[in-house]
Image (spheres, rainbow, N blue to C red):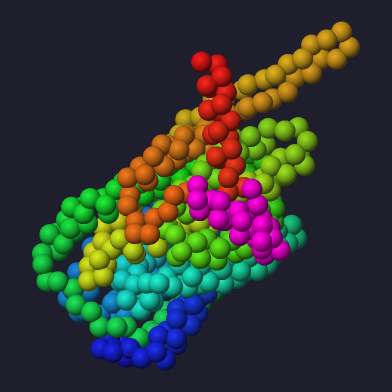
Amino acid sequence: MNLKPTRNLTEKDLQSGMKLVIGDGLASEAMTTLTGGTFLVAMAVLLGASNFQIGMLAALPTFTNIFQLISIWLVRRFNNRRAVSVLCSIFARIPLILAGMMILFLPEAGIETVIFILFFFYFFGSIAGPSWNAWMKDLIPENILGTYFSKRSSYMQTLNVILALALAFTIDYVKKHYPQFELSTYAYMFILAGIIGIIGALVLSKVREPMSYLTRENIFQLMKKPLTNKNFLRLLMFNSAWVFALNIATPFFTVFMMKTMGLSISYIIGFTIISQLCSILTIRLWGRFADRYSNKTIIAISAPLYILCLVGWCFAGIYSHPYMNLVLLFLIHVMTGISTAGINLSLTNISLKLSPGTEAIVYLSAKNIVTAVFSSLAPLVGGYLADYFDNRSLSVMAQWSGPKVSKAVTLVLLHEYNFLFLIGAVLALLAIELLVAVKETGEVEKDEVVRIMRMNVKNNLKDYYIIGDLISWHEQIRSLLKRRSSSTN
């Protein structure tokens, strides 16, 4: 396996590399689908995990990002981002096979052992990540970053939809007809994920790396540079506040639907797929507008949509008619897919864009390490708060009494997880205020982009019918509140 960098890349090397990176992305997505999200939480619940332990599982992927300093040291030591990324990716996949074998043959070991093994999966993955990001920054031309990665993401999400749906039906079938094999099914999923992940790393090893040189400064002096860059520091502050707000709530969506609403895996995955489909249908649109205008503008448009989704979760499950709850979950997942497609794509791209080319790995590692502290702390806080609010509730009722009819309607019912969703929404709203201070080249006023997007959507309704007026809902609500406020003064 020749992993040495190449001094001069040809156009053929670039085109071949871009295709192989998509192949690696598909393998990584399959691995993540098999071992993460709803399936990981469902397996943890089956193993008797507490809210705090579910929070630990959610915190692991981001907590291990603090070890990305090792990635910088390795790249400086060997000047080979390709080797660091590929080898650490292989080392990361092996623990998945071990976890599957442990669940299969030693299920009595419990969730604690699974958490311990998965730590090494995320540990090596966190080392591979920064070198991969810096490698991709030099490989992919900057003027097509948004378009290329939105295309890659759409392929990955399509695979996620197909695979997740097949797995959901399989697990529900096994649970209904062969419940004694439910845990074994998850074990085989982990083993398969590890094998696919290793194959993906081998595909990635075929991608050429343009030669680069990282300065030999002291590693801690290097890490100070992003913190002295005022604009990048502002981005760090926004990103940290945003991930903290989201990670208080998001790890518990699946638990809420399983425990509180009593939904099966097929229903939960079905809603997840709806969200993924909305992302697939809109991510290329977000990517084109991010390239044409700015990533910051896209975040300013899509972040308020996601906050509305968090507020919507506070009302899930309170209606007496089950179909009303399902309709609300459908709307939440539609808006979540649309908004997260724009947010995730733009956060990745703006970080790449604001990172100096020669020190991209340092800047990206600093971002990941700083945000890791907040995004890993949040699920633990969320798990603690979920336990705290377990025997507490807040309800707001509307009651009508008359000579013939007496009716009471629940307007708001907060308990356990619903409290987390409301807290997350409030913190996310505060985080958006930090985005204003971030400066990005080519930045265009948000209202102007919204106007152009609305025009584009109307002209291409057959392709982008889902977005519609959703991109301006938060503006309409804000204007309405302002008018009411001014009229009462």
In the image, 427 versus 99, the foreground residue is 427
* Residue 429 against residue 455 in the figure, above or below: above
- Magenta region, residue range: 447-469
Q: Within the magenta stretch, is there residue 213? A: no
In the image, 434 versus 307, the foreground residue is 434
Task: Decide if residue 333 is on the left or right side of residue 303.
Answer: right
* Residue 312 against residue 62 in the figure, above or below: above
Residue at x-position 32% and y-position 45%: 437
Q: Find the residue positioned furthest to the right.
A: 404
Residue 96 is situated, as x and y percent measured from the top left of the image, at 46, 68
Residue 212 is situated, as x and y percent measured from the top left of the image, at 23, 79
Labels in figure, total: 0
Residue at x-position 72% and y-position 44%: 326
Residue 353 is situated, as x and y percent measured from the top left of the image, at 34, 64
Q: Main secondary structure of the magenta part?
A: helix
Residue at x-position 36% and y-position 49%: 239
* Residue 162 against residue 427 in the figure, above or below: below
Task: Decide if residue 214 is on the left or right side of residue 349.
Answer: left
Q: Within the magenta stretch, is there residue 462? A: yes
The image quarter in which residue 453 lies = bottom right
Q: Examine the rendering and report whether any part of residue 273 can be seen.
A: no
